[in-house]
Each structure stands twice: as structure tokens, then as C-alpha cells.
């Protein structure tokens, strides 16, 4: 089976349970437990095992998959933030399949880091391409005034720096709170 067929099967799995549950609110203790379990599955990096854990928690907590992906941990990181920092972009792709749209990439944690900030800091080019493809805002600054370009340059991810510039970053001369420009 080729990669496209595998993703078609994954999309079918991810889209199947959308109408099963009404929108319900998870209790805070359930949110924390679910977030920890799914973060562990994200960090393991196996997309199929992650999807199995996602489906299992959706059924057990009786909430939609799209509600689960926005659960935040103590630092305000969603599963998207965690997935943006790992080497394999397949899990992030699965999360995007659950809830496609521009809002995904704009989701910020408590430090103002979007998912793209995390990808830029970690040097995840394929992840950045996925996020830019779903409307990631290239020049959004976090609480320190750093844009994705600041993060990529500071972390010496030059190929990613080139990608951000080619995708329209205009923050070359934008100073952060320390008075530093990316280039």
C-alpha cells in the first residue's frame, strides 16, 4: 500500500467518529489526564498508535476528536504544539486532518508561541510546510517579540529560515523585546 492509500485510510478513521458525540465539556482532571496520555503517544512518534489513543480517549470521555486536540496542558501547549516539536510530521498531519483550517496554526500557548514558533525553534521544515499550508501566520510575534523567523535564525536552522523568507516573512528588521532583529 502506498503513502496516499495509507492516508486515505487514516482520514476515514479520523472522520468517522465526528458525529458520534455531542459537544460536552471535559472536567479539568479529565483534561489533564487525557493531555498527558496523548502527549506521551505524540512523543512516541507512531501516528497509528497515536490515532488509536486519540480514538480511545474520545470514546471513553465521550467527546469529539476535534475537542480533544485543543486540550491544553499546564503550559498552555496543545497536542499541536507537542507534535510540532517531534521529528515525524505524520502526527501533526493527523491532527490537521481532524480539524483543518487556519485557526490551527494560530493557536498560541501561554508564552504566545504558536505551533509554528515551536516548529521554527525545533527546525522542523516539513512541519512548518504543513502549518504554512493551512494558513500559518509567518510574522506573528510571541510574548518575547520573537517571530518564527527570529526562532529559526536564533536556533541556526538556515533551511527553515529560507523557507520562511520564501513564504513571505516580512519580519527581517522587526525587533524583539531585546532589541534584536532576526537577520
Image (spheres, rainbow, N blue to C red):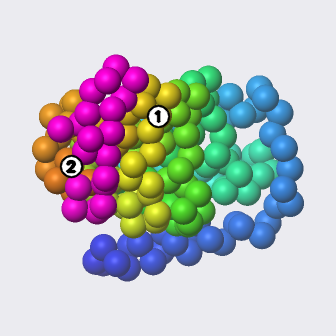
Judging depth in this view, the residue of 182 and 44 nearest the camera is 182
* Residue 34 locus on image (x, y percent): 66, 36
Residue appearing at x 66%, y 72% in the figure = 16
Extent of the magenta region = 165-183
| Residue 82 visible, this orientation | no
Numbered disc 1: secondary structure: loop
Number of on-image labels = 2
User: Residue 74, relative to residue 67: is it above or below?
Assistant: above
Relative to 35, say whether 125 is above or below: below
Image coordinates of residue 105 in percent, x first then y, are 50, 53
Does the segment drawn in magenta span residue 101? no
Q: Earlier in the sequence, mark 1 or mark 2?
A: 1
Determine whether, in the image, residue 102 is placed left or right of residue 57.
Answer: left
Which residue is painted at 80% across and 51% down in the image? 62
Q: Secondary structure at mark 2?
A: helix
As drawn, the label of residue 142 is 1
Q: Main secondary structure of the magenta part?
A: loop
Q: Is residue 182 left or right of residue 45?
A: left
Mark 1 vs 2: CB contact within 8 A: no
Q: Nearer the viewer, residue 165 or 119?
A: 165
Q: Residues within 10 Å of mark 2 (few under 14, many from 20)?
A: many
Residue 160, disc: 2
- Magenta-colored stretch includes residue 167: yes
- Identified at 37% across, 40% down, the residue is 147
Residue shown at 58% from the left, 57% from the top: 103
Q: Nearer the viewer, residue 27 or 61?
A: 27
Q: Nearer the viewer, residue 128 or 21?
A: 128
Quadrant in the picture for the N terminus: bottom left
Amino acid at each position: 500500500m502506498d503513502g496516499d492509500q495509507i492516508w486515505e485510510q487514516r482520514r476515514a478513521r479520523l472522520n468517522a467518529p465526528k458525529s458520534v458525540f455531542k459537544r460536552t465539556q471535559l472536567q479539568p482532571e479529565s483534561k489533564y489526564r487525557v493531555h498527558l496520555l496523548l502527549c506521551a503517544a505524540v512523543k512516541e512518534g507512531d501516528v497509528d498508535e497515536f490515532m488509536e489513543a486519540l480514538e480511545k480517549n474520545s470514546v471513553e470521555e465521550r467527546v469529539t476528536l476535534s475537542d480533544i486536540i485543543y486540550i491544553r496542558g499546564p503550559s498552555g501547549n496543545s497536542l499541536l504544539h507537542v507534535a510540532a516539536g517531534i521529528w515525524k510530521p505524520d502526527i501533526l498531519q493527523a491532527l490537521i486532518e481532524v480539524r483543518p483550517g487556519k485557526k490551527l496554526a494560530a493557536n498560541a500557548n501561554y508564552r504566545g508561541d504558536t505551533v509554528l514558533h515551536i516548529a521554527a525553534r525545533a527546525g522542523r521544515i516539513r512541519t512548518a510546510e504543513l502549518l504554512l499550508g493551512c494558513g500559518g501566520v509567518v510574522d506573528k510575534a510571541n510574548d518575547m517579540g520573537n517571530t518564527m523567523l527570529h526562532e529559526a535564525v536564533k536556533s541556526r536552522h538556515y533551511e527553515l529560515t529560507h523557507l520562511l523568507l520564501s513564504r513571505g516573512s516580512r519580519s527581517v528588521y522587526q525587533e524583539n523585546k531585546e532589541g534584536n532583529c532576526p537577520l
